[in-house]
Each structure stands twice: as structure tokens, then as C-alpha cells.
Amino acid sequence: MKAFTVLLAAAALSACAASPSREFYEFQPKIANPSAIIAADIGFNQLAQQKGQWTAFREKAGKDAVLFAPQPTLAMEWLKGQTDPAASLKWRPHKAFMSCDGKTGVTTGAWERSDGVVGYFTTVWQYVEKNARGDGEWKWVLHHKDTLSTPRAPKEMIETKVASCKGLASAKITAPSRDAMMKTGYAGDQSLRYTYIVQANGARTVEVTLWNGVTTETVIMDEVASQ
């Protein structure tokens, strides 16, 4: 009987190991998955085709989201007065970058208009949690684009890169010229940083950096001429 009891106990322990509890999964840290923001970006485009371009921008914008018109503008204020065009822009991501904690990401890629005009875009995404369990959705918090004379050629696979979780990234402090406006945003763990600098004439740069475990490296540097 004693041997039988030991076997039952061993079987119970084995079952526990094979089937972790619900709580085990619910409290695991979020794992960085660039596919999540790729899916968010593709879904964003699909929504624009179905409901209208500016309707999609309104639905997916974070509460303090910024776009450029050409100066930095709170998106929800600017979007209030916009009517959906007859045909929405179509866009597709070519690259995706994500912070180590998996809660901030950036997509960049190509867009085209129905009249044949083409260009590129860069969008910063933030995962917005709705409850203590971590349920939520991706919202865009910064979006900018510019035209190109030649379209960006799509690659066979969307490139992805995740910031290193090794060490601690430091906050970089820089100052723009006197007439320029600058703002920097960080992922919660500082492993991803995005900065825009806008001159008085509308010219701007948008830079995205990732922490590689030793230093930060620039992964996106967009430059837009004066408008």
C-alpha cells in the first residue's frame, strides 16, 4: 500500500508539471513578438480599406497620438475635421522593430495612393493594457510619411529586430536648434527610443534607436524636406 501511495504522489507531481496552472500563464512577462505589430499594421491598412482612411486612423490612435501637418499635431484634434477620401491609401510594412519588453514597436514601409503617388511611412505602436491581466490592444502613437519618386521595393520577408534585454539602456539627452521642436519617446524599459525634430519651415527628422546590449544603434533615420 505504501508503494502504491508513492506512485500516486509521483503521478500527481508529473501531472502538475505537464499542465501548468492558469495563473502561471496569466502572470508571465510579455514576450517581445514583432509579428504582433506587423499584424497590427496590416490590420490597420485593412480597416482603412473597409471603413475609410481617416476613420481607421481615429479608431487606432492612442489618446495622445501625434502626426505632422506639417508641424507636430495631436492626431485626435486634427482628425476631427477630416473626411475619408474616396479611396484610401494602401500601405504595407517592410520592417518591424520592438523593445525588449514587447510593449513598444515601430513599423516602416511603403504606401501608394490611387493616383499612383508613392511614398514611405514610419509608425510607432504602443500596447495599451485594459486590465490587470494584461489584455489590451496595439495603438499607434506617432505616424509620419513622405512621398518618393521611386517606390520602395518590398522584400521577400519582413525584416524584424528586437532590442537586447542585456544591461540597461541609458536615456540620451540632446538639444535641437533654437527654432526647432523636439520630442523623444521611450519604451518602458528604454530599450527602444523614437525622436522627432521639426524645424520652423516644416523640415523634420524621425529617428528610431534600439539598445543592442552595449549601446544604442539607429535603425530608422527618416528625413523630410521643408514643406
Image (cartoon, rainbow, N blue to C red):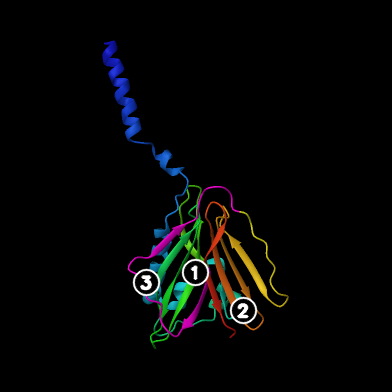
The residue shown at (50%, 80%) is 146
Chain-order first, disc 1 or disc 2: 2
As for residue 28 lying within the magenta part, the answer is: no
The residue shown at (70%, 74%) is 177
What amino acid is found at the position of numbered circle 1 in the picture? Thr
What percent of the width, then of the height, locates residue 56?
A: 44, 73
Residue that protrudes farthest toward the front in the picture: 214
What amino acid is found at the position of numbered circle 3 in the picture? Gln
Q: What span is colored magenta in the figure?
A: 142-169
Q: Which residue is mark 2?
A: 71
The residue shown at (45%, 43%) is 28
What percent of the width, then of the height, locates residue 180?
A: 68, 76
Relative to 5, is 164 on the left or the right?
A: right
Crowding at dot 2, Cα within 10 Å, few <14 / some 14-19 / many 20+, comes out as some
Q: Which residue is mark 3?
A: 46
Tag 1, which secondary structure? strand
Q: Nearer the viewer, residue 58 or 170?
A: 170
The quadrant in which the C terminus is found is bottom right
**Considering only vertical position in the picture, is 164 above or below 13?**
below
Q: CA distance from mark 1 to mark 2?
A: 16 Å
> Toward which corner of the image does residue 23 lie, by quadrant?
top left
